[in-house]
Amino acid sequence: MSKTEEKIKAQKRINNKQSTVFYTSARASSKNGLIDKLERLINRSKLLNSIDSKERVAIKLSFGERGSLAYIRPPLVRKVAEIVREKGGIPFLTDTNTLYYHKRHNAIDHLETAAINGFTPISVGAPIIIADGLIGNDYEAFKIDGNYFKEIYIAGAIYHSDFVISLAHFTGHPFGGFGGSIKNIAMGCASMKGKYQLHSEYEPKVDEELCNLCGRCIKNCGYSAIAKGEKSIYFIRENCVGCGECVSACPSGAIQSKLEQEERKLQEKMVEYALGIRHQKNGKIVYLNFLIDISPFCDCLSWSDTPIVPDLGILISSDPVALDKASVDMINQTPSNPISRMEKNPESKDKFRTLFENVNWKWQLDYGEKMGLGTQNYRIVEIL
């Protein structure tokens, strides 16, 4: 049997497999608060039972940007750290420095931002480590067999940890359609060099009719890649790193990616990074999605918009593809918040395509299934 036939057979086995996603709703009461429900969800899933004594457990999350209010609340994160200690592990909270130039671009600003947003060793009951070091150059290379990459660059503290718990705040995202567990691990565990790899296909363009020369994109660009022209801004291509900060900063929607195909490549590259990191951890990785404060944009912004749907709850799985698919389905099946950005199409059955019509969020799930990261075939087990 050829290697191609073996891969096809292996892929069919993955596609036929059904992954379990455990879920608890955001509904709570005086005797059953959300923190208690999170503990019950984790313990009944038994997914953290494989933490061995004295293992260093990286709890990977985003601390949120300064000015943002939509990140995962610190008391929920503290409960995860407490459970890790009960299992015998040694927890630490971690994230990597951002490619875009703001208040998480280096470890000093990053730690200060985490503290401002309520994440301190005292508040969360665990140390906080910026995984790729002071300026993003602390990493280890890891060989993979991807279509885009043969080597990826994993942040040092993630690479040297024994177990990873992904805490993803599920949101909309201008490149992925949504940001969930795949993005949290792929983009979030990559060093600065890895982030350059992931964004290398991105090239922005400007709609001159929509640009009003407000200058926000220039202010938010840390690479001197944007300048003002007579009628609109223009890009200095050799300076652009493809971080996408200008897309998020533009209030008029004048800046977009150049080709739809580029978002697809970015999503597929994220899958390869997520798969490589899972291999490097020998499968000792668990994923949680928090469907709370589901904002239309990711936590990298310095502001938060109105949630697109009500709070839904928390999900956990060992399969990030199934977990992200279940999260998308749950959001799409929930009535829109009529005073959010969904007001332009409140009856939409695909909320993330409504938010980002040129971005197909299914690309990352389809490619994840193809590459063996997981399956879109799932069953929900609700924990009350």
Image (cartoon, helix red, strand yellow):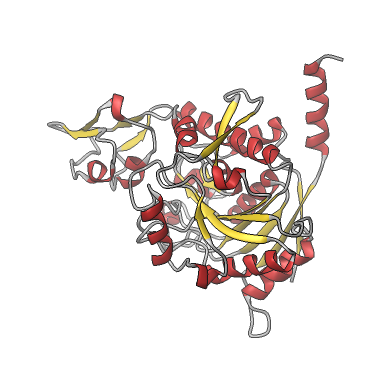
Q: Nearer the viewer, residue 366 or 289?
A: 289
Q: Position of residue 67 (x, y in %)?
A: 35, 61
Q: Position of residue 292 (x, y in %)?
A: 55, 63
Q: Residue furthest bottom?
A: 30
**Residue found at x 36% / y 45%:** 248
Q: Position of residue 331 (x, y in %)?
A: 59, 55
Q: Nearer the viewer, residue 276 or 335?
A: 276
**Residue found at x 45% / y 51%:** 298
Rendered-image quadrant of the C terminus:
bottom right
Q: Residue furthest left?
A: 230
**Side of 219 where 262 appears, left or right:** right
Displayed quadrant of residue 81: bottom right
**Residue found at x 28% / y 36%:** 223
Does residue 257 lie above or below 55 as drawn? above
**Side of 185 where 112 appears, left or right:** left
Q: Residue furthest right?
A: 1
Q: Nearer the viewer, residue 231 or 277?
A: 277
Rendered-image quadrant of the N terminus:
top right
Displayed quadrant of residue 37: bottom right
**Residue found at x 28% / y 41%:** 221
Q: Residue furthest top?
A: 2
Residue 353 visible here: yes
Q: Position of residue 58 (x, y in %)?
A: 61, 54
The mark tally for this picture is: 0
Residue 365 visible here: no
